[in-house]
Amino acid sequence: MYREMMRIRILENRISEEFVHQEMRTPLHSSVGQEAVAVGVCMNLNQDDVIYSNHRGHGHYIAKGGNMGRLVAELYNKSGGCSRGWGGSMHIMDVGAGVGLTSSIVGGSVPIATGCAMGLKIKKKPNVAVAFLGDGASEEGNVYESICFAKVRKLPIVYVCENNKYAMYTAMEKREPSEHIADKFRSILHTEIIDGNDVEEVYTVMEKAVAKARHDGEPSFVECKTYRLSNHYEASYSEDFWYRPKEEWEEWKKRCPIEQIKEKILSENAENTEKLEEIERLVRKEVADAFSFAGNSPYPDRKELYSI
Ligand SMILES: Cc1ncc(C[n+]2csc(CCOP(=O)(O)OP(=O)(O)O)c2C)c(N)n1
Ligand SMILES: [Mg+2]
């Protein structure tokens, strides 16, 4: 779990560093701070289970087994990218890794994930679909429609809501009557509200939710309380505290999911320090290799525009 979260954290930080050079011509939404959700969820999934995600999807793709080099190449619109360079950060696809798609349309991938679950059921596949969505996306009508449909049709799907308290620059309390997104859905299907910064809790709750979806056709809605330590997107990274209090950000920084699991690992055995350092060294190499791969990949052929 530590390694997988570090892969996402170090990658996202490197992407942010490189973004200022203006060679990635795609809007970028970092998932720093939310790594435990991606990892705790995806560690319960098989390769043939399928995830759908949103504009903040890098971590989901990596946690699901996507290739890091192909993700970075996608951010540079290179032909080696997972969407052959035509999608950019918000349109990541990798059928082999079980990443159906990520979408820039807020809430847009939720009905598609639901349709995928219906397909899995019709084809009698032993697989599940997972729809990642934000607290803001839960306010889209098609999310409500999808959830009702999944319950009535007994579809093998889990809706994972990453409640990071904000939709762009608008806080939850200005948009929602309850502090819990799950309150809106609990009369429809089984819901859970959990600490999304505790990777072990996410893993354990998702283990049950995935089993219910896979074996009983019982969909669930799992609300993970988390926080984005990054700004909404890269272009506005300079000043972040005009719409959220700095104290709030500092409080959540103390609850960083990676620091929490690291402390736990070290409290169990202080000799693990070396192992953790070795993991970090290997991850940094993987990230460096991913950027080299992207750098060496050519741009797509213009003719492809008419063949996709
Ligand atoms: C249908 C639609 N409406 C509005 C937008 C503009 N938009 C982009 S991200 C975003 C906020 C989404 O918030 P949330 O779902 O909580 O995800 P988060 O950014 O917090 O991860 C909005 C409104 C959009 N991309 N698509
Ligand atoms: Mg949000």
Image (cartoon, rainbow, N blue to C red):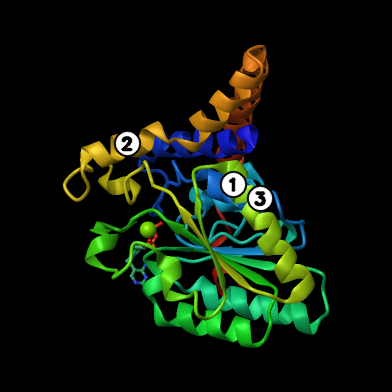
Residues 92 and 256: in front is: 256
Q: Earlier in the sequence, mark 1 or mark 2?
A: 1
Kindly tell me whether residue 165 is visible in this rendering. Answer: yes
Report if the beta carbon of the residue with label 2 is closer than 8 angstroms to ligand 2: no
Q: Which quadrant of the structure image shows residue 230?
A: top left
Which residue in the structure is indicated by mark 3?
204
Label 3 Cα neighbours within 10 Å, binned few <14 / some 14-19 / many ≥20? few
Label 2 Cα neighbours within 10 Å, binned few <14 / some 14-19 / many ≥20? few
Tell me whether the residue at label 3 lies in contact with that at label 1, contact meaning CB atoms closer than 8 angstroms: yes
**Farthest left residue?**
242
Ligand 2 lies in quarter = bottom left
Q: Residue at x 42, y 70 (%)?
A: 183
Residue 33 percent across, percent down from the top left: 44, 41
Label 1 Cα neighbours within 10 Å, binned few <14 / some 14-19 / many ≥20? some
> What is the secondary structure assignment of the residue under circle 1?
helix
Tell me the kind of residue under disc 3. Thr
Q: Is residue 198 left or right of residue 42?
A: left
Image label count: 3
Residue 118 percent across, percent down from the top left: 69, 81
Q: Tell me the number on the disc at residue 22.
A: none
**Residues at marks 3 and 1, CA–CA distance in whole angstroms:** 5 Å
Which residue in the structure is indicated by mark 1?
201
